[in-house]
Image (cartoon, helix red, strand yellow):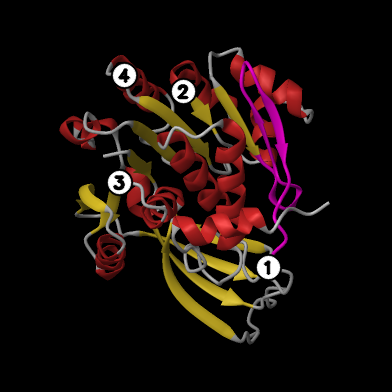
């Protein structure tokens, strides 16, 4: 396969519009409710498949109805689910996503089975078949974060596999303390700007990039939402603007961007074209409610690139 998406698999319940939470004991109404599968690894895998990339899923879900939904959705999207484990005790991870009128989101999360994923759960017969091992959701997998994750990345690199890493918000506040063992074994890192600032202690894009490249990371990609993205390698530096689209729901846009970037990478495209595909994929995501509903095929996604960027 081209990419193996290892990490968090979640069921998202999305409500919109929710601009404030009710006081204790009180009730607030909202207009729209949808149930989708989500989680960084899930979203990235499904979007990669829609872009025509051969992709597998690896992670842990519960032995419950939500777990059935995750497997069903991945299978319907032609994602190989052989690497998914089912936990007997923990339920499938769950997030309630409150979407404000402007598309911004707030999250309430139950870590569930994602918190039980550990190094011994991984099937190396599957990992050995991939060109890119993408770990999605670093910093929210307590039994896998840190040294266990570093061990997996290191072994993957010795097998000639390209390694990619996407972070999540670290509610523990440990940030670099947790992630640092992994960084020497990462080829591509794709945090959002806020996560990158917490990890590096700086807000300046070139300084962030230098910080990560000092660990040997070849490609640093910083997602900045409506401000676009910043990509840096040893040879190139790019600032790619966001494509103008009507924002319905920003949930999953960062994961879609990552999928676009990995798709361009595995296809051997140059950095600029790869970054433009990533930006277009992220833009497509925000046009519909849910993490993957706005994503179409590669041809349709590339049409967004041709329409141009914001000034």
Q: Distance from label 4 to label 2 (Cα)?
A: 12 Å
Residue under pointer 4: 160
Query: How far from the left and from the top, in percent, is residue 286?
Result: 61, 64
Query: How far from the left and from the top, in percent, is residue 88?
Result: 19, 54
Residue 241 belongs to the span the image colors magenta: yes
Residue in the image at 27% along x and 66% along y: 76
Disc 3 versus disc 4: nearer the observer: 3
Residue in the image at 53% along x and 58% along y: 301
Left or right of 165 on screen, residue 29: right
SS under mark 4 = loop
Quarter of the image with the N terminus is top left
Mark 4 / mark 2, whichever is N-terminal: 4
Q: Distance from label 1 to label 4 (Cα)?
A: 39 Å
Residue with the most extreme left position: 125
Q: Distance from label 3 to label 4 (Cα)?
A: 18 Å
Mark 1 / mark 4, whichever is N-terminal: 4
Number of numbered discs present? Answer: 4
Residue 36 visible here:
yes
SS under mark 2 = loop
Mark 2 / mark 3, whichever is N-terminal: 3
Query: Looking at the rendered structure, which numbered label has been put on residue 247?
Result: 1
Q: Distance from label 1 to label 2 (Cα)?
A: 32 Å
Residue under pointer 3: 54
Residue 213 belongs to the span the image colors magenta: no
Residue under pointer 2: 186
Above or below, 67 against 207 in this view is below
| Circle 4 crowding by C-alpha within 10 Å: few under 14, some 14–19, many from 20 | few
| Circle 2 crowding by C-alpha within 10 Å: few under 14, some 14–19, many from 20 | many
| Circle 3 crowding by C-alpha within 10 Å: few under 14, some 14–19, many from 20 | some
Query: How far from the left and from the top, in percent, is residue 99?
Result: 63, 70
Could you say which is closer to the camera, residue 165 or residue 266? Answer: 266
Q: Which residues are magenta?
A: 223-247
């Amino acid at each position: 396969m081209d990419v193996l998406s290892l990490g968090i698999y979640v069921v998202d319940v999305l409500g919109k519009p929710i601009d404030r939470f009710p006081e204790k004991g009180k009730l607030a109404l909202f207009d729209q409710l949808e149930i989708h599968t989500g989680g960084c690894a899930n979203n990235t895998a499904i979007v990669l498949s829609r872009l025509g990339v051969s992709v597998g899923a690896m992670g842990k879900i519960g032995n419950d109805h939500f777990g059935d939904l995750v497997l069903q959705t991945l299978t319907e999207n032609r994602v190989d689910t052989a690497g998914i484990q089912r936990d007997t005790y923990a339920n499938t991870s769950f997030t309630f996503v409150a979407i404000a009128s402007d598309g911004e989101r707030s999250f309430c999360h139950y870590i569930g089975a994602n918190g039980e994923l550990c190094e011994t759960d991984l099937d190396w017969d599957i990992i050995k078949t991939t060109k890119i091992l993408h770990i999605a959701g670093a910093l929210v997998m307590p039994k896998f974060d840190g040294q266990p994750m570093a061990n997996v990345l290191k072994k993957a690199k010795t097998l000639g596999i390209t390694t990619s890493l996407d972070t999540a918000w670290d509610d523990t506040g440990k940030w670099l303390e947790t992630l640092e063992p992994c960084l020497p074994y990462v080829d591509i890192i794709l945090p959002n700007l806020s996560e990158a600032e917490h990890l590096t202690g700086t807000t300046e894009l070139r300084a962030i990039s230098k910080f990560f490249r000092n660990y040997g990371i070849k490609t640093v990609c910083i997602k900045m939402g409506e401000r676009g993205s910043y990509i840096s390698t040893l040879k190139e530096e790019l600032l790619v603007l966001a494509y103008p689209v009507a924002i319905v729901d920003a949930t999953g846009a960062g994961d879609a961007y990552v999928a676009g970037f990995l798709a361009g990478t595995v296809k051997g495209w140059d950095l600029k074209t790869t970054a433009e595909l990533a930006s277009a994929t992220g833009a497509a995501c925000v046009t519909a409610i849910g993490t993957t509903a706005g994503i179409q095929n590669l041809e349709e996604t590339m049409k967004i690139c041709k329409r141009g960027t914001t000034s």
